[in-house]
Amino acid sequence: MIQSISIIIPNYNGSNLLKRNLPQVIIAVDAFKKKYTSTIEIIICDDGSFDDSVKTIEELSKGTHGISIKSILHKKNHGFSSNVNSGVEAASGEVVVLLNTDVYPQEDFLSPLLSHFDHEGVVAVGCMDKSIEDGKTVLRGRGIGQWKKGFLIHTAGSIEGKLTLWASGGSSAFRRSYWKKLGGLYSIYNPFYWEDIDLCYRAWKSGYTIMFEPKSIVVHEHEEGAIRSQNSASKIKIIAYRNQFIFVWLNITDRNYLQNHIGMLPYLVLRSILKFDIAFIYGLFLAFILLPKIVQLRHNNKKYFIKTDKEVLSHFLSDFSN
């Protein structure tokens, strides 16, 4: 069993969520410590909140039954990738567990999650999400993907599978040494979206493995999270489009995939114009602005890649044939 663990909770204006969910994290940590000798710390990274989050963090850090709670307070908002990276940088654990503020774990979620790290090639493990969506509970947490119409199309996969294309940045565990080797979450994706898929895809292409653990259960109240509650639908759509382009330009190396992507762009641009999908055009424009940085990061990525895109996505072909 892993001997040291750091639980990282990124926060942005999530005072009410912290009050509700952090006690559940502490209960899970306390239960784990009663069974194992591993040391555990909790690191809360506040990304320039303007609600009473800082005060809430101070209050919740008291009376934690000997569980260490550290806080990292950013003076201004940087975005999800930068906020989480600051937590990992301050962490001392062999494994870092990422939990969003809109997530609370079941008491016994840590043991099955951590068991996978006995295998050296495992970079990350994703949790089972009891996802609260439109008042309904949906079981998800395993991601799959395929190349289609010039892009990587990702979606939720069957929870029966063992491998996942990515481990969610809001409910997962990563081996810290590999996180640092791969460069962590890329800040180019700030403020949100695609950063966890990107890191895990880089891990797959570098020869590592991402697992899914259905016994590690968290409840995820997506609609109450910071992204949807504090950003307009149009902004979210623009950023999602922008980061979809960034992902392809950073990571896709198979020639036929790249040719397909380039060949599809004129059609997709024309279609977006005819449908008045301004968000697509704006997202593409914003991605082009970042092209010099993308080229630099892409060059760095290729030093570690040993698998083709086809090889990576072949792990999930059976999901789409069923």
Image: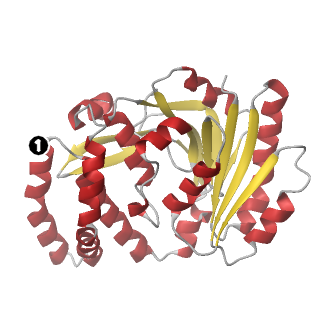
151 and 254: which is toward the camera? 254
* SS at mark 1 in the image: helix
- Give the residue displayed 19% in from the left and 43% down from the top: 253
Q: Is residue 122 left or right of residue 15?
A: left
Whole-percent x, y for residue 24 in the image: 78, 47
Q: Quadrant of the N terminus?
A: top right
Q: Is residue 98 left or right of residue 180?
A: right
Question: Disc 1 residue type?
Answer: Arg
- Give the residue displayed 66% in from the left and 71% down from the top: 13
Whole-percent x, y for residue 122 in the image: 48, 28
Q: Quadrant of the C terminus?
A: top left
Which color scheme did the rendering employ for the protein? secondary structure
- Look at the image and tell me whether residue 141 can be seen: yes
- Look at the image and tell me whether residue 160 can be seen: no
223 and 290: which is toward the camera? 290
Whole-percent x, y for residue 265 in the image: 13, 62
Q: Is residue 268 left or right of residue 247?
A: left
Q: Residues within 10 Å of mark 1 (few under 14, many from 20)?
A: few
- Give the residue displayed 26% in from the left and 31% down from the top: 306
Whole-percent x, y for residue 136 in the image: 59, 52
Q: Is residue 207 above or below residue 279?
A: above
- Give the residue displayed 51% in from the left and 66% down from the top: 79
Q: Is residue 34 above or below residue 62?
A: above
Q: Disc 1 marks which residue?
A: 255
Which image quarter: residue 73?
bottom right
